[in-house]
Image: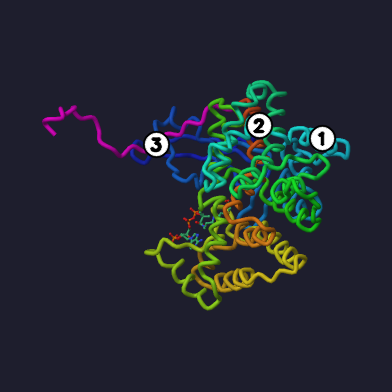
């Protein structure tokens, strides 16, 4: 650790304090304010956490100005090109790329946990058929802690690992069943002879009446989409998982909390919102009208799939996604006018001063919906796929937190601006 400090001076009393400055392996250093309240009687104030590092982590690094995303030191573009999702899961969880033996062992461990307790079948039946699949996901994943009591002791490293494997393994089954339930088709059981992505597609699009033949182009695209969504540092849902877990809650409950947070349109729900927006725009001629609305402060409309809290440059995931989008549509021989519309919208927005000045670029969600639509997913499933892929990131971050000896319950403070103490007024005197 360096001896760097930053001095904080109270201009009224003249008191000053030296605050330690901690360096990461790369990226901005942080001012350590852990003792600030005890020493100065002040809190820091940072709603939205724009300048707050909430934890120490070795998993994911983002340089938002340069548009760089790395997991455990490997660039996302390289992982998307050369790796597969199982390998990326291993990397996120264990810190290193697996050897061939380690990879086989990991795949076996995941494969053996893909089935869910049969009683979960009946849980689905309690939902309305027209329920949003994300609502079903929050409920079913939260309920896993009622089924897997032997992996909820967070203080047991073995149980932590079993819970991690179970969550990664069962999420495709749970997600596919959320879809099957909504379309009134029978649930398909996992097939352990298929890869992770193939198996998910089989459970989603297969039917018991016919053998399912995986399409290698779609399976590869699905796998790549999973890689691109696997982790993303301390975003809203990951921070939710960490905060939920900081109280000692079991991992299934924590991941359900993450799914709830992901659902919002400012976060994972944006992929669904992008497609709805493109459909609403409908034709290239109407793009200027929507761009104008996005710039109007009195209009709540925003260009969905544009802008990011951290990236002030092109989101590297969006670049890979755009390329994949063209590949998948090409392979399937589809000519989706929404892709043409998206490309044109991107072109116009990137030349517009408003978007240029505010450094608003396409994010991962801008093109993902078009690929998912081409693959046959309804828009309501888009965020479910994000949740499925992000589960490994949530789990890795949750494990890292539990294994960090300096971990304490997350308990932020506030700037109170309400009434100060006043006398109670009886109801007949109000
Ligand atoms: N369209 C129009 N204006 C925008 C947009 C947009 N998509 N995004 C940001 N702005 C403007 C915003 O109005 C603000 O202007 P001003 O400074 O004049 O008030 C400025 O840019 C900064 O925006 P912000 O809301 O303060 O930034 P934030 O970091 O709080 O929000 C965001 C980031 C992603 C929520 C936001 O850019 C947004 O709502 N984008 C659309 C939704 C979206 O695509 N979300 C997916 C994010 S990537 C996947 C994920 O992580 O889940």
- Reading the image, the residue beneath label 1 is 108
Q: What is the quadrant of residue 292 in the picture? A: bottom left
Name the N-terminal-most of marks 3 and 1: 1
Image marks 2 and 1: residues in contact by CB distance under 8 Å = no
The residue nearer to you, when weighing 82 against 268, is: 268
Quadrant housing the C terminus: top left
Mark in front: 3 vs 1: 1
User: Pointer 3: residues within 10 angstroms few (<14), some, or many (20+)?
Assistant: few
User: Pointer 2: residues within 10 angstroms few (<14), some, or many (20+)?
Assistant: many
| Left or right for 188, reference 273 | right
The residue nearer to you, when weighing 383 against 245, is: 383
Quadrant housing the N terminus: top right
Magenta includes 426? yes
Numbered circle sitting on residue 369? none
- Reading the image, the residue beneath label 3 is 414
Distance, label 2 to label 1, CA atoms, is: 21 Å
Magenta includes 38? no
Mark in front: 2 vs 1: 1
Q: Which residues are magenta?
A: 407-430
- Reading the image, the residue beneath label 2 is 399
Secondary structure of residue under mark 2: helix
**Residue 309 horizontal/vertical position (percent):** 54, 53
């Amino acid at each position: 650790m360096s001896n760097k400090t930053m001095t904080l001076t109270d201009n009224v009393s003249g008191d000053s304090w030296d605050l330690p400055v901690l360096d990461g392996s790369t990226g901005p250093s942080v001012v350590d304010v852990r003792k600030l309240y005890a020493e100065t009687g002040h809190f820091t104030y940072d709603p939205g956490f724009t300048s707050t590092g909430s934890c120490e982590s070795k998993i994911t690094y983002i340089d938002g100005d340069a548009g760089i995303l790395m997991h455990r030191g490997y660039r996302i573009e390289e992982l998307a090109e050369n790796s597969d999702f199982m390998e990326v899961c291993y990397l996120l969880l264990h810190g290193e790329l697996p050897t061939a033996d380690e990879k086989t062992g990991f795949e076996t461990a995941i494969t053996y946990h893909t089935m869910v307790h049969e009683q979960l079948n009946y849980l689905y039946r309690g939902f309305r058929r027209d329920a949003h699949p994300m609502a079903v996901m929050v409920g079913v994943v939260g309920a896993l802690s009622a089924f897997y009591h032997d992996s909820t002791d967070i203080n047991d490293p073995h149980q932590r690992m079993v819970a991690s494997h179970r969550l990664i393994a069962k999420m495709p089954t749970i997600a596919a069943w959320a879809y099957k339930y909504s379309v009134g088709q029978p649930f398909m059981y996992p097939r352990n002879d298929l890869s992770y992505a193939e198996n998910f597609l089989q459970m989603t699009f297969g039917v018991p009446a016919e053998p399912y033949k995986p399409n290698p182009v779609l399976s590869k695209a699905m796998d790549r989409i999973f890689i691109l969504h696997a982790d993303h540092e301390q975003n809203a849902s990951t921070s939710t998982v960490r905060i939920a877990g900081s109280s000692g809650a079991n991992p299934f409950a924590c991941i359900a909390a993450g799914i709830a947070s992901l659902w919002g349109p400012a976060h994972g729900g944006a992929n669904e919102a992008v497609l709805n927006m493109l459909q609403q725009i409908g034709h290239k001629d109407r793009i200027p009208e929507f761009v104008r609305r996005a710039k109007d402060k009195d209009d709540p409309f925003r260009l969905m799939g544009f802008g990011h809290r951290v990236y002030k440059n092109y989101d590297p995931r969006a670049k890979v996604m755009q390329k994949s989008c063209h590949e998948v549509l090409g392979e399937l021989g589809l000519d989706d006018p929404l892709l043409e519309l998206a490309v044109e919208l991107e072109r116009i927005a990137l030349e517009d001063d408003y978007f240029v000045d505010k450094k608003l670029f396409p994010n991962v969600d801008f093109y993902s919906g078009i690929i998912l639509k081409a693959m046959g997913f309804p828009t309501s499933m888009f965020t479910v796929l994000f949740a499925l892929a992000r589960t490994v990131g949530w789990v890795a971050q949750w494990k890292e937190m539990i294994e960090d000896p300096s971990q304490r319950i997350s308990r932020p403070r506030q700037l109170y601006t309400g009434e100060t103490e006043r006398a109670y007024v009886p109801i007949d005197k109000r």
